[in-house]
Image: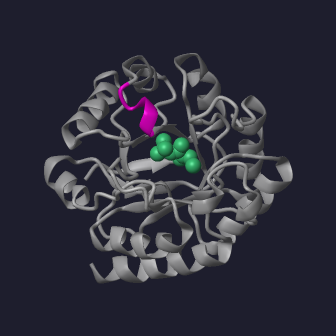
Amino acid sequence: NTRILIGADHTCDTVTVGEASASPVIMAGPCAVESREQLLKTAHAVKAAGANVLRGGAFKPRTSPYQFQGLGVEGLKLLAEAREQTGLPVVTEVMETEMVDMVAEYADVFQIGARNVQNYALLRAVGKHPSKHPVLLKRGLSSTVEEWLLAAEYIMAAGNPNVILCERGIRSYDPKTRNVLDLTCVPLLQEMTHLPVVVDPSHATGRRELVPTMARASIAAGAQGLIIETHCDPSVALCDGRQSIEPETLTRIIREAKALAHLL
Ligand code: PEP
Ligand code: MN
C-alpha cells in the first residue's frame, strides 16, 4: 500500500493512512461548517472521541440551490482555527478549479465529492497543485470501480500520487437507505490498486442508526479508515442531520474499529 501522510504542511498532528497494521484513520466532524461555535465544539468533541482528522464542508454541493450552500471562505478560516485548537488536520471539499489555491491554503486534504468525480479539470487541478495535499476521492453516485480508478489516475498523472479512495455508497432503486454501501469494493480495490481505501458509512446509509454497524463492517472488510458525520445536535444540523451521529456514538465506533482492526 501507498503510505500517505496527512497534516505535514500545517502545525498539527500528522496522520499516516495506508500503513499495514496501523489502526484505522478516523475522519469526523459535521457535514457543513455552520458557525464558529458549532465547529469548535464539534471539533473538540471528535478529538476527545479519538478521531484523527477533522472533516467539515465549507463549500457544499447541495441538490437544491435554495439549500444552505456553506459558509465558503469563512468556513475555511474556521476549520483552520479548529485545527489550531485541537491539532487535528482538516479535510474539506473543493468544488471548483478556481478555489483549489484557496482551499489548499487552509486544508490538509482536498476532498473531491461524489458529484465531481468526473470533473476532469478539477481532478487535474488538485493533481498538479504544488501543495501536494492528499486527495480524498469519493466514489461517484453511479461510478463503476473502473471509472473511479481512472479518476484517481487523472490526479496521479497530473503529479499527485497521494490519493485516498472513499466508498460512500452508490445509487440504487430502494429509497429505504440513501445509497447502497458497496463493501465488496474494499477487498476488490485492494487487489486492483495500491491506494488506501476508506469508507463513509454516513452518506452510504443516510440513517444514523445504521452508521455504527456499517462502520464495523467496513473495518472488517479491510477499510483503512472511516469518515463519519458527527454533530453535537443533529436535530438542528443545516445539512445531513438525519445521518449525523453524536460524539458519544463516535467514541463507541472508534473503540470498536480499533478492536476489530487489531484482530485482522
Ligand atoms: C459530504 O462529505 O458531505 C458529501 C457531500 O459527500 P458526497 O460527495 O459523498 O456526497
Ligand atoms: Mn454530508
The residue closer to the viewer here, 262 or 171, is: 171
Q: Main secondary structure of the magenta part?
A: helix
Q: Position of residue 119 (x, y in %)?
A: 40, 23
The residue closer to the viewer here, 107 or 242, is: 242
Q: Quadrant of residue 37?
A: bottom right
Q: Which residue range is magenta in the image?
A: 114-118
Q: Position of residue 18 (x, y in %)?
A: 34, 56
Q: Position of residue 188 (x, y in %)?
A: 17, 55
Q: Is residue 225 visible?
A: yes
The residue sitting at 35% across, 26% down in the picture is 118
**Residue furthest out toward the right:** 37
240 is higher (above) or lower (below) than 264:
above
The residue sitting at 25% across, 58% down in the picture is 186
Q: How many marks?
A: 0
213 is higher (above) or lower (below) than 237:
below
The residue closer to the viewer here, 148 or 63, is: 63
Locate residue 19 relative to residue 243 in the image: left or right.
left
Locate residue 172 relative to residue 39 in the image: left or right.
left
The residue sitting at 65% across, 24% down in the picture is 102
Q: Is residue 7 visible?
A: no
Residue 233 on the magenta span: no
Colour scheme: one colour
Residue 117 on the magenta span: yes
Q: Position of residue 133 (x, y in %)?
A: 49, 36
Quarter of the image with the C terminus in it? bottom left
